[in-house]
Amino acid sequence: MAGFINKVLLVFLILQNNCMCHESTSLLKRYQQSPWTLPSGCPKNRHPDISPNSPNFKLEVRMPGVTPVMSDSYFCTFVPVPPGQKSYIVDFKPHASMETAHHMLLFGCSMPATNEDYWDCGGRYGTCLDEAKIMYAWARNAPPTRLPADVGFRVGGNTDINYIVLQVHYGDVTAFRDNHKDCSGVTLQMTFFQQPLIAGIYLLLSDDTVIPPGEKVVNADIACLYKQTAIHPFAFRTHTHQLGQVVSGYRVRDGKWTLIGRQSPQLPQAFYHMENSMDIKYGDTITARCVFSGKGRTTVTRIGRTSKDEMCNLYIMYYMEAKHAKPYMYCMQEGSPELFKHIPPEANIPIPVSPDMAMHGHHTGKENPDENVILQQPKREEEVVLDQVSHLEEAIDWPGEKLKLGQVSGVALDSKNNLVIFHRGNHVWDENSFDQKHIYQPQGIGPIQYNTILTLDPVSVKVLNGVGSNIFYLPHGISTDKDDNFWVTDVALHQVFKLGPRGDYLLVLGQAFQPGSDSSHFCQPTDVAVDPAHGNVYVSDGYCNSRIIQFSPEGKFIMQWGEGSSLSGIPKPGQFFIPHSLTFVPVLGQLCVADRENGRIQCFIAQSGQFLREIQHPEFGERLFAVSYTPDNGGQLYAVNGEALVGKGVPVQGFVLNFTTGELLDIFKPTKQNFLMPHDIVAADDKTIYVGDVQANTVWKFVPAEKAEHRSVKKAGPGMEMHEIDATETFLEAEIEGKMRTPNVLEKHKSNNVLKQSSTAVSPVLITLLLIIPVVMLVGIGLFIHLRKGKIYGEDPDSKLESIQSSGGILGRLRGKSSRGLNLGNFFASHRGYSRKGFDRLSTEGSDQEKDDEEGTDSETEEYSAPPLPPTTSSS
């Protein structure tokens, strides 16, 4: 019954707020009951007042009648902007009393933190579900912010601003002793008429400043070279916490410093208009300095979100020509000491602030503020703070290389952040796998007999679940949905599968072994992404088609988009040369595609297929294999590239990107050896990254530098005994070898345990063992000679195979080329009557990294160099 009520409420809220694309049922769990009723005196409309005869309209963003009971309360509410088209905010009209509201802030969001009428946003929920883009600030004793003529903030459409969130800080609740309801807010003057000049915010912030306790003066210096179309600043806003003395911003041009704005961050933090007009153009340097004092502190203070931490933020409000507009830009680069030797002296002089002017909640009025008071300050969620991007390092002792796997084609995560691996068992994709019509040739060998989908504990590597045996021929992409179902593609079958957690068939798309380009056929589909809100399914198709196909949750064809691009010329938006990997951005309803041979990421509106933008960096090189999204820091993308088709090219490595700006934040790669062919990537919420390498038959793990695991997993945590690790490895090995653990393997682990238990001292048992070993060796040699003779003279071949299998993990060595190893091509050809085509290079012996001197080519694995020929049928 409760679930039904929640669903009814969700539908009501969705219809009420015109947000059919973005609501989440999980949001209903927050603030289920409102402690106050909506008074009749407050505006109730949550939609713009639009006249059909005028492009101009108003949008009320007002508190729906709240009565705060605690000082320093932060309440938020939201309204949607007109959906489906761009509109422009051209003026702000505040409605607030300095006796009631201490300050107000307006943010642009893709999605608010909750869908309730209002909520406490001084706690953990904040303002926006994604990045909060500040647009307006009002504070008592501060002048109002006015936009210049022909200037507007662009919202709606494809701007990623679908909602306006109002935050009101109620500093002193004395005025609410009569329990009246507050309707503070802002009226937005808006228009559909396109503005020639677009307003934006340039944010300078420090992310690594350290303030020692008792230090009198600490400077945080920020500087970035400006490389965009000219902007015209007209207002600024400073922000620090209690320790900030003054914040100053400057434009540096030809060695001359020109003031943008200077203010005490302890004054009301509104946007203050600049005294003089100026511009910032390509080649200028934008700088800021925050002056702090650690006086009164007994511990080190660092940059952070809470009141006991600090911030150093300078917001510059500007306008620029609409055709070049970039509404939000950031600078986090530390300024060089040489540059800041020439900063004007005024930047170092604190601005005195009287207690009656100070920002309540930031300044206690005491010379030595009480630390307990500071700790009780509300969490400041209203600020846009970009967490410091940590460099990713390989978890060197994570046993990724010890996983006994086939070609790892895909990696994913389930709802508990367990690692899901999709691998090819004893099958490989090489130049002999398909004919010119993309028909899979070695169909007769049957499907992979081993579990191709393994779910593992990400720390202990214990196998939690294994499914997918006797289904697939050449696995490729994998993803999971909110119910932990597996969505996978098979390039040999030309099909897409939905499997339940237990491996049961839930949905199959496409026709087995039948390539095509219509709505019911695929041609080597590469990946799947699922919209968690609507359940729609997106398939990248693929190697011989260049399109993205959208299906309903039930598998009904909805639409497709995309076309092929040529090797020559610059690819256009929406063109693909092997759409290889997909990632869904839930809060924005976007789908991003790794356009492999074009070396770029393309992002689209998922529902319509409308192109939004591309991300491409020289570091990508010619080929970009996979992409993954996480909502960290307002959204980040993770990607991996591949070797160039011709020549040496750029290094093969991984990348961390700012989703909003496309900025390259970090580059990472293994430390023990190089990537061979990283094929897929997935990012966890805790910033752990997994990369599946199709040529190394392994999964790499990367973690932030401060969390890097510099110790062996065998020592990682209480209760993790040696035999538990061995058992895990043996399980994986047995999974591939037919789910059998031979007596030899068990004996090996028993020996390991005996050695572990007896290693602390020399015992009589050890002495006895040392005496017996030579005798055992002589007996073993004799048995070996006897068995060798038996095998030479006609012992059953199946027994020979079983013996070889029991000697070690077959799939950990599938790509070795030792002449003594078992050749599965010969085995299948001689024992089952099948063609050996495509299996000649499959061996159970040798290193994963060895190359075949006789047969080694650029087509060593599935991703062979020559791009596939175009399909004989149309891909439109």
Image: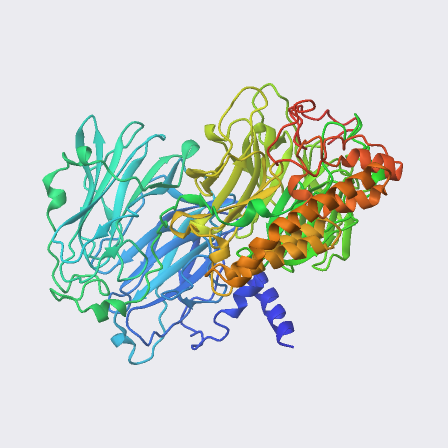
Q: Position of residue 280 (x, y in %)?
A: 28, 32
Q: Is residue 479 above or below residue 223?
A: below
Q: Residue furthest right?
A: 833
Is residue 824 visible to us here? Answer: yes
Q: Nearer the viewer, residue 545 or 447?
A: 447
Q: Nearer the viewer, residue 162 or 744?
A: 744
* Residue pictured at 43% horizontal, 74% vertical: 40
Question: Which image quarter: residue 243?
Answer: bottom left
Which quarter of the rendering shows the N terminus? bottom right
Q: Is residue 783 above or below residue 577?
A: below
State how many labels appear.
0
Which quarter of the rendering shows the C terminus? top right
Q: Residue furthest bottom?
A: 178
Lateral position of residue 247 relative to residue 417, left or right: left
* Residue pictured at 30% horizontal, 39% vertical: 333
Question: Which image quarter: residue 831?
Answer: top right
* Residue pictured at 49% horizontal, 76% vertical: 33
Q: Is residue 264 above or below residue 831?
A: below
* Residue pictured at 44% horizontal, 60% vertical: 78
Q: Position of residue 649 (x, y in %)?
A: 51, 23
